Image (cartoon, rainbow, N blue to C red):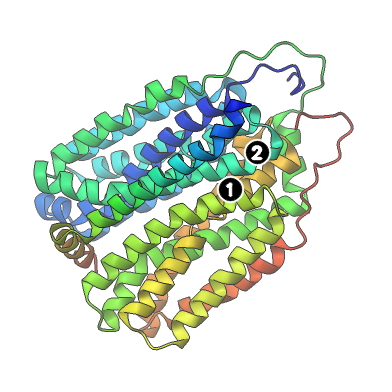
Amino acid sequence: MRRRESRPWRRAAIGLAAVAALLAVFAAYLNPHIVVDLASRLWACF
Amino acid sequence: MPSPATRQTLSMTQVLVCGAAIVTLSMGIRHGFGLWLQPITMDRGWTRETFAFALAIQNLAWGLAGPIAGGLADRLGAFRVLLVAAALYAGGLVTMAMATSGLAFTSSAGVMLGLAQSGCTYAVVYGVIGRNVEPSRRSWAMGVTAAAGSFGQFLMVPVESWLISGFGWQNALVLLGCLALAIMPLAWGLKEPQRAPTTVVQQGIGAALREAFGYRSFQLLTAGYFVCGFQVVFIGVHMPSYLKDKGLGPDVATTALALIGLFNVIGTYAAGEIGGRWPKRFLLSAIYFLRAVAIVAFLWFPLTPWSVYIFASVMGLLWLSTVPPTNATVAQIFGVQYMSMLSGFVFLSHQLGSFMGVWLGGKLYDSTGSYDVVWWIAVALGVFAGLINLPVREAPIARPSPQPA
């Protein structure tokens, strides 16, 4: 019974952790160094 | 194979954690290979064609070896296939770093890595999920695993960019080879208990293949997956070039690829979740129709950075969202005895579509001077795939003797 009650909290915690991880990776793409590096490598392909 | 009621299974948490981690690594490591084009071609003095040819061979090898790796996983267990695939992955990356000729590079980056990917990506892991997760939660579990693969792709591009900048391109490949070895301990988590002897009549591989390829719904799913490969790879490979032609800066293309990666994670998870509640044929149909609508809107509205970001976000949501419902439908129709092998055949169609998307994109661009024709082919194919998924029958196929679900 106790296990069931804790499930929504566990789900919420997992969801929050997933969102935090996604935002952290997205922030890495916005880092000026990475933007310049990726853009120059990407552009070199065409 | 024993009935599901008596078969000893792995815990769902164990399967999901290990399966998701394996797919995160296997899908993630390969996703940033384009970043090596510039340093490798400059350092080795090769043409871009040498590099591109090796990666094209990698994609074809992945698709062609998929059914074989899947068949071996179905017969011998995913564990053994994963071990061999991890060794090939690590070996392929290290030999890719050391290759000094085009042939050696094609053998390592092309053949070895293509074979490795066939043994440690979705088809093999989904077989374990199919056999160990109850049917009502299968689509969700496949969505979780596909989302992990999408996350790996999203994560590894900046990580690999950082590795190349910090350690040099060769050391970066060796480090990734070490990372690929982590698949081996994770494979232990997918080691299934030996199957007990059973009195249930088993279906042979030949019979399973004849049954699948003679079944209308399997043909329709396979054809739909071809379209998925065509659209995704055409956009992923040619969109930066398209944006450049239209005068947009490289930062727009980079942000667009980041948005596709971000929303792809959300879309694949959501597709698995929705596929467990709604008929999967309608979900697949909706995904393909929405892709067609998104492309038409993208072409219709004036091209600005914001229109690119909105298109990238919508396409990201629809990017790999076909993976969980397509594979869950295969499991639902044919059962799980040959699931990895059948998923491998469906994926082969995806890879042929990918090849056509890249090749036709370049070919028609060269002959017409723009991507317009290919964009409209992608729209037409989206409508076609949306329509052909509607009549798919998801119910288990009728057989003379019962097969496990």
Horizontal and vertical percent position of residue B52 = 30, 56
**Mark nearer the viewer, 2 or 1:** 2
**Quadrant assignment for the N terminus of chain B:** top right
Chain that bears disc 2: B
Where is residue B280 drawn, in percent x and y?
A: 69, 54
Which residue is nearer to you in this view: B197 or B312?
B312
Residue B68 seen from this side: no
Residue B137, numbered circle: 2
B227 lies left or right of B329: left
Which amino acid does the dot numbered 1 rest on?
Pro
Please, what secondary structure does the residue beneath circle 2 have? helix
Q: Is residue B42 left or right of residue B11?
A: left
Name the residue: 57% across, 55% down. B322
Residue at horizontal 76%, vertical 21%?
Answer: B5
**Amino acid at pointer 2:** Arg
Of the numbered discs 2 and 1, the one sitting upstream in the chain is 2
Question: What residue lies at 67% left-to-right and 47% top-to-bottom?
Answer: B276
| Vertical order, B122 against A41 (above or below) | above
Q: Splitting the image into 4 quarters, where does residue B312 fall?
A: bottom left
The residue that disc 1 covers is B324
> In the rendered image, is residue B67 in sight?
yes
Binning the other alpha carbons within 10 Å of mark 2 as few (below 14), some (14 to 19) or many (20 upward) gives some
- Disc 2 with disc 1 on a shared chain: yes
